[in-house]
Image (cartoon, rainbow, N blue to C red):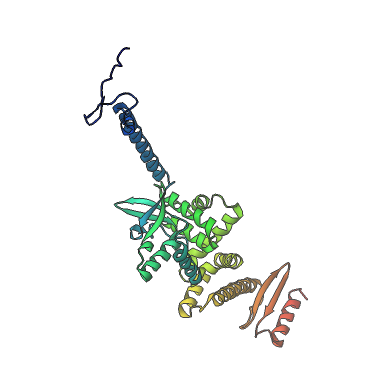
Amino acid sequence: MAKRKRLTPLALPEGGMIDAPVGKVPDHVLRQRAPIAGVAQDTARTSALEELSDTLVRARAEGRMIEALPLDQIQTDHITRDRVAIDDEEMKALKQSLSARGQQTPIDVVDLGTGRYGLLSGWRRCTALQALHSETGDARFAQVLAVLRPITEASDAYVAMIEENEIRVGLSYFERARVVAETVDQGVFKDDQTALRALFATASRAKRSKIGSFVGVVRAVGGALRFPQALGERAGLKLAKGLGTHPGLAQVIADEWLKTPPANVALEQDRLMALCDRAADNGAAAATRADGPALPQGVQLKDKGAGRVTLSGTGVDAAFKAALQRWLEENGHG
């Protein structure tokens, strides 16, 4: 019977030898990979890491990645904010939410270089986080979740801000008009119409027209009003018409507000509407005096349209009525 032939002992990666017949090689030796297999695995791992790195770089550059940034590196005044003011109750509720649940929605920023980021949208979240960090000293409020937007033009920055706030919180007509005026004044857009079309491209023509009317209010009395963001659509359009028809009305408002500032929203709105009515009455009275009798002190004339006017005031007494009747008869209106 022939002898069995012994095989050459296995060579280990460390250079050691195992002298054992086939079928008797220890399991840990059989699990040793061949050198070529290790090279292939390392190459595949490196390639996967490079691909992942490239994907993350692209995602960040394209504004598809959320990252945590130091709050003190966010420049909140990078562009003129569209929000004129924020309600105290709204801020309180936002702070409570951030404290209890953390930041749920990232802000939008643009890279300014040198470790600084310009805020596009999310001013309220930044403000609330700053307040919480100041009040508590908690490190979790010292960072903000943000998305880096690939924006290079100032006009694109304003469009991004408007779009985000129109969707999330909604803006008053005054706030919309204020951004239009500011961007034109800063040279971002050449005129109001260009700014309106760019910033509110998705709005209807009627809405853009109303915003345009409020631009006149912003330019004429925006700096004088105490509660401009509360100016409703109807009141704002009436004020815009009054300012356009009676150029001196803006100065009257500025003088009165400087002398006696309104204490609250309701008082400001009531005074504005009263001044608009007074300007309209005075305008109608001036037109009447050109072809008719002069109105005495204490008499106001208001054009009701459709051939109707009203005369009111302390001066509308018996003597005035008699004088008016005589004038009408003398001029063929009796």
Residue 133 is left or right of residue 272, and the answer is: left
Residue in front for this viewpoint, 142 or 154: 142
Residue in front for this viewpoint, 153 or 272: 153
Residue 223 drawn at (x, y percent): 45, 69
Residue 205 is left or right of residue 307, and the answer is: left
Q: Is residue 109 visible?
A: yes
Q: Is residue 248 visible?
A: no
Residue 146 drawn at (x, y percent): 41, 54
State the quadrant of the N terminus: top left
Residue 189 drawn at (x, y percent): 45, 51
- Residue drawn 36% across the image and 50% down it: 111
Can you name the residue that lies furthest to the right here? 334
Can you name the residue that lies furthest to the left here? 15
- Residue drawn 35% across the image and 26% down it: 23
Residue 278 is left or right of residue 227, and the answer is: right
- Residue drawn 48% across the image and 76% down it: 257
User: Quadrant location of residue 258?
Assistant: bottom left
Residue 16 drawn at (x, y percent): 22, 30
Residue in front for this viewpoint, 325 or 310: 310
Residue in front for this viewpoint, 183 or 285: 183
